[in-house]
Amino acid sequence: MTEIEKLLQEEQQKGLASLEAVTDAETLDAWKQNYLGKSSLVMTTFGKMGSFSKEERPLVGRAVNTVKVALESALAGKEETIRQESLLKGIEKETLDVTLPGYPIKRGRLHPINLSLREIYRIFGDMGFQVYSSPEVETDDMNFTFLNIPPYHPARDMWDTFYTEDESVVLRTHTSPGQIRSMREYYPNPLRVILPGACMRYEQQDQSHEIEFMQFELLVVDKNITFADLKGTMDDFTKRMFGPDARTRLRPSHFPFTEPSAELDMACIFCGGEGCGVCHGTGWLELGGCGMVHPRVLQYGGYDPEVYSGFAAGVGIDRTTLLRYHIDDIRYLRANDIRFLEQF
Ligand code: FA5
């Protein structure tokens, strides 16, 4: 063993022994200067590596590294012990003033879509509707076939969605499959439900289209339900949601699961029906689709279409929210930007 290796070994023993006696941060600092500081044996040995012979160099290098690692790890252990002790001392000395006011907790708020949803629940609750939950991941049969959209039907293109590895399971494109589920559960009783929830579509995103959005479905099944019930309910909903001046119209349309079918439009609240950018100059804004439940869908739900009739509607909650709060882009709703959300 060379002279310098011996010296280093002694330095390590001395260092570790004197560290034992250290009990406070100041002494620890002095110890650190002494054994690992610029002029410590360890650091000066590193500095003069060049002066050792070729043979000595790797031996000295290894020895000085071993000592440095040993001293540093002992130092880290001691630092932690002293930190813990001083924390404990602090806690023992501390007194708690329970009369001081607490820190204010930042309050969250309801998302604008949820605000709309609560309003929708309130309005339809008043009209005697019950809320029915239905799955967001659906079978192809529920999402399409039982709604009178068989596999070859071109209407499937309008509602392209995301498929799972099992092609018979899809992310639902609308809340309408809940019609079948609720009918099958309530049969043979009359039915008056709303079915809210998320829908997914394979869609080009823009100002008014998202790939994930919320809808609520309305379904009424009973004896003697007519188109007048549908019109009255939708008109009343729009007035309660957007104010007594809101005007609606039913525009003939086509859905495979309703006959006859219509689109529910509301006079544009931005221009009062004059025509503007938001309503593309038409004076009307589309809220959703609706119609009388198709006899085949009633049958799939278990009801005899000779005895029962019903109406259904599917309204976009995101779009309803845009109109309620005069928001001009649907993408704000899920961007998670606190500056936007704080305004509600
Ligand atoms: C339907 O989804 C039918 N199931 C509605 C229906 C139900 C008709 C019951 C008859 C009886 P549609 O694809 O038009 O129809 O969508 C209905 C509403 O959902 C639209 O008016 C719109 O408000 C909303 N919506 C549709 N696609 C999107 C989208 N990509 N982003 C945001 N909202 C959307």
Image (cartoon, helix red, strand yellow):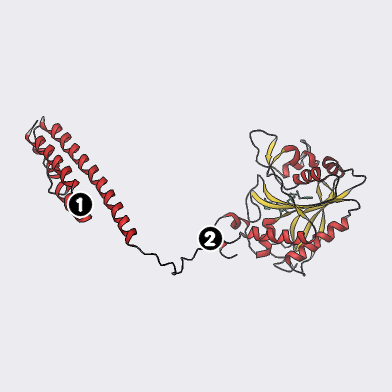
Q: Can residue 197 be seen here?
A: yes
| Residue 131 horizontal side relative to residue 340, left or right | right
- Considering the image in quadrants, where does the C terminus appear? bottom right
Q: In the image, is residue 244 above or below residue 217?
A: below
Q: How many marks?
A: 2
Query: Dot 1 lies on which element?
Result: helix
Q: Position of residue 148 (x, y in %)?
A: 81, 41
Q: Report the amino acid beneath label 2.
A: Ile
Give me the disc on residue 115: none
Q: Which of marks 1 and 2 is nearer the N terminus?
A: 1
Q: Does the residue labelled 2 lie within 8 Å of ligand 1?
A: no
Residue 337 falls in image quadrant:
bottom right
Place of residue 247 in the rendered image (x, y in percent of width and height, measured from the top left): 79, 66
Label 1 sits on what residue type? Leu
Q: Nearer the viewer, residue 291 or 181?
A: 181
Counting from the top left corner in percent of width and height, residue 206 is at 63, 53
| Crowding at mark 1 (Cα within 10 Å: few <14, some 14-19, many 20+) | some
* Mark 1, residue position: 28
Which residue occupies 16% across, 53% down? 30
Please tell me which residue is depicted at 71% across the width and 68% down the height of the picture. Answer: 271
Rendered image quadrant of residue 283: bottom right
Quarter in which the N terminus is drawn: top left
Farthest right residue? Answer: 306
- Name the residue at 77% across, 54% down: 130
Give the distance between the C-alpha atoms of the residues marked 1 and 2, in whole angstroms: 47 Å
Displayed quadrant of residue 251: bottom right
Indicate if the residue with disc 1 has its beta carbon within 8 Å of ligand 1.
no
* Residue corresponding to mark 2: 338
Q: Using a 10 Å C-alpha cutoff, classify the residue at mark 2 as few (fewer than 14 neighbours), some (14 to 19) or many (20 or more).
A: few
Q: Nearer the viewer, residue 209 or 257?
A: 257
The image shows residue 20 at horizontal and vertical percentages of 19, 46
